[in-house]
Amino acid sequence: MEKKYTKIILDKIKEYDSIIIMRHTRPDGDAVGSTMGLRQILRLSYPEKKIRLINSDYSDYVAFLENEDKDVSDNIYKKSLGIVIDTGDVKRISNKKYGLCKELIKIDHHIDHSPYGGISWVEEERASACEMIAQFYFDNEKELKIDSFAATAIYTGMITDTGRFKYGVTNSSPFTYAGKLMDLGIDVELLYAYLYAQSFDEMKYKAFVLRNMKITENGVAYVYISRATQKKYGLNHEEASNCVSYMENIKGSLIWLGFIDNEDKTTRVRLRSRFVTVNEIAEKYSGGGHARASGATVHSKEEMNSLIALADETLKQYKKKHKSWI
Ligand SMILES: [Mn+2]
């Protein structure tokens, strides 16, 4: 029988005294949860090894998890095994020193457009990278240790990347691993409070989005968030980007878009959908991502309008050809 990736990766980890874990920039729950979960599992299992999680940025959204580690010298990188999780492309790796590592492992669930790493474990049909880390642990359960913190970190990415098991879930695997993790002692009530509780100001921002969103003829809902609006509501870019999720349950609106101005005059686009695929739209505007959750960038009002028009046409064609949408 062919050796499983989870076993190959564990064997490689055993060869090294120093391991540096990395993820993508502008991290989400999956990127943070998977890397933090793996760090904790490896620290518990191999107390004699140096296990570090090093990146160049962070996310407030999952700040209830632990801190990452400080950067180390180039010499340490040269002796280390690098493990990059949830990152499709080397350009998106938050730690720009990844190339210094003696060897690199890729663990990911994005479309493998640009492969990297001596060992590359990529499964596009996985709902989250955290699900793969869960599998890595349970496949090697006899040799590895875990605790409720690691389980919580991994579970966090599983639920955030799937919108609480709504997107990308096509088989029982996410539920199987979620169930196994749950038995390790996750405080679900506390976790969901961390994920859902919003400040009063955020609520006011939500009201702004609901008041100012627009809809196209065929049902593309969208909202534009200027720098001035971000300032007015005291939002960082990540908080401002939540606008897209506020529009997700409008009947007949199967695509919804958030346009959030960046500091450099470009505009970040968040594309979300149900039933319809939006990553092809994103790919036409310097972006990409998942079928129903993608990101793109536009450089002018004209480009913004043409993206909206393309989304509208895509939705028009979809509604023509399909019956069971709401
Ligand atoms: Mn992910």
Image (spheres, rainbow, N blue to C red):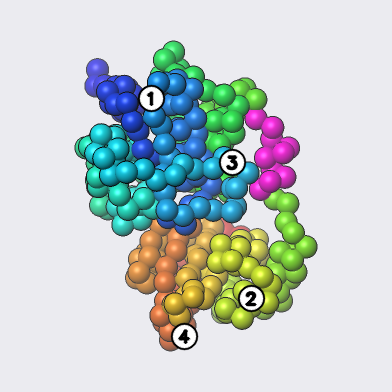
Residue 250, placed above or below residue 177: below
Residue span colored magenta: 186-195
Mark identifier at residue 151: none
Q: Earlier in the sequence, mark 2 or mark 1?
A: 1
Q: Main secondary structure of the magenta part?
A: helix
Taking the image as shown, residue 30 lies to the left or right of residue 326, namely: left
Mark in the foreground, 4 or 2: 2
Queried on whether the Cβ of the residue with tag 3 lies below 8 angstroms from ligand 1, the answer reads no
Label 4 to label 1: alpha-carbon separation: 52 Å
Mark identifier at residue 49: 1
Residue 321, placed above or below residue 95: below
Q: Earlier in the sequence, mark 4 or mark 3?
A: 3
Q: Earlier in the sequence, mark 4 or mark 1?
A: 1
Viewer-proximal residue among 109 and 220: 109
Residue 5, placed above or below residue 56: above
Viewer-proximal residue among 310 and 63: 63
Label 4 to label 2: alpha-carbon separation: 20 Å
Which residue is the site of mark 4?
301
Mark 4: secondary structure: helix
Q: Looking at the image, do the residues carrying marks 2 and 3 touch, with CB atoms under 8 Å apart? A: no
